[in-house]
Image (tube, rainbow, N blue to C red):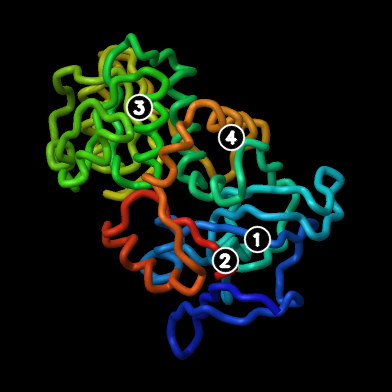
Amino acid sequence: MFKGILIEKDDNGYRSRLAELSEDSLPEGDVTVDVAYSTLNYKDGLAITGDGPIVRSFPMVPGVDLAGTVTASSDPDFAVGDQVVLNGWGVGEGHWGGLAQKARLQGKWLIKLPDTFSAARAMAIGTAGYTAMLAVMALESNGVTPDKGDVLVTGANGGVGSFAVAILSRLGYRVVASTGRLNETAYLEQLGAAEVIDRKTLSGPGRPLSKERWAGAIDSIGSHTLANICAATRYRGTVAACGLAQGMDFPASVAPFILRGITLAGIDSVTRPRADRIAAWERLATDLDLSLLPLISREIGLSEVVDTAPKLLAGEVRGRVVVDVNR
């Protein structure tokens, strides 16, 4: 038996709880992992509270991230004792995820944990940091270098935003951080933000084309915010879109794309090929100041997850929530 967060839906309603689970109940997979740490992401919060249609089958163990040790494997790429990390691949949605002490997974979803990281550090980074790194790499591949001008990061107090600010700053970019919590300006400056702006300046309906302001942007908000970012992006700049906190709509004009030749790069972190995952984690080992992790993340126990989820959705949680599944 092991402990995990279990989401159930039946005639009695939708509910999430800390439960005792049997190893026999684990889904099919060719690698079994003793989970050491997981995380509580925005998507996990939606799943646990039922505020979004995240879970595709019931019962479900949420958790889009995990790090731990292989205890059984029929996949030739992994052996007992290997330290592994997983981000995405629909775990916690259609396949039992990381918010439990054990997981059974497909080996193709895993990568070996780089030596630089402990399981706890890997989960302090998690999908948020991995996604931020993919977004930074997209800007780089499209020629957005520090000398080209400012880079905007929206949702800067969140997980992806916090890591994006920290990584970009370390790489020499001048970072403009957009947030709805201006009282967290000092935190963003500690991460490396050169300027902090109120998200309200970007969140309403805007013009098809605005004054050029930034060479690139990493956006986790979507909707009007993304449209306004594109409208103010400099000639041949790039916007990396990786979230939809404001909405899935994109009420924009083609003007920035035609008249300024900007690029809108979509960042998929869920089903990314293994080679891209390995590259992103290798970059994180060198391009992220690991001394910032205690500032960006905080740790809770598995027993605190259900109560923390609604606080995360309400925007009351800064940065990352790391979950020690063994307490």
**Residue 41, above or below 96:** above
Q: What residue do we see at 45% from left, 64% from top?
A: 300
Question: Where on the picture, by quarter, is residue 21?
Answer: bottom right
Q: Mark 2 and mark 1 in contact? Answer it, CB < 8 Å.
A: yes
Q: Which mark is residue 281?
A: 4
Could you say where residue 131 lies in the image, as x and y percent from the top left?
48, 39
Residue 325 badge: 2
Measured Cα–Cα span from mark 1 to mark 4: 19 Å
Residue type pointed to by label 2: Val
The reply to whether dot 4 and dot 2 touch (C-beta < 8 Å) is: no
Q: Amino acid at mark 1?
A: Val
Instruction: Kindly identify the amino acid type of the residue bearing the numbered disc 4.
Output: Trp
Which residue is under mark 1? 35
Q: Secondary structure at mark 4?
A: helix
Secondary structure under the numbered disc 3 in the rendered image:
strand
SS class, disc 1 = strand
Q: In the image, what residue occupies the spot 49% across and 25% down? A: 137
Quarter placement of the C terminus: bottom right
Q: Is residue 41 above or below residue 223?
A: below
Q: Residue 82, how many percent across, how many down?
A: 77, 48
**x and y percent of residue 299 in the render?**
45, 58
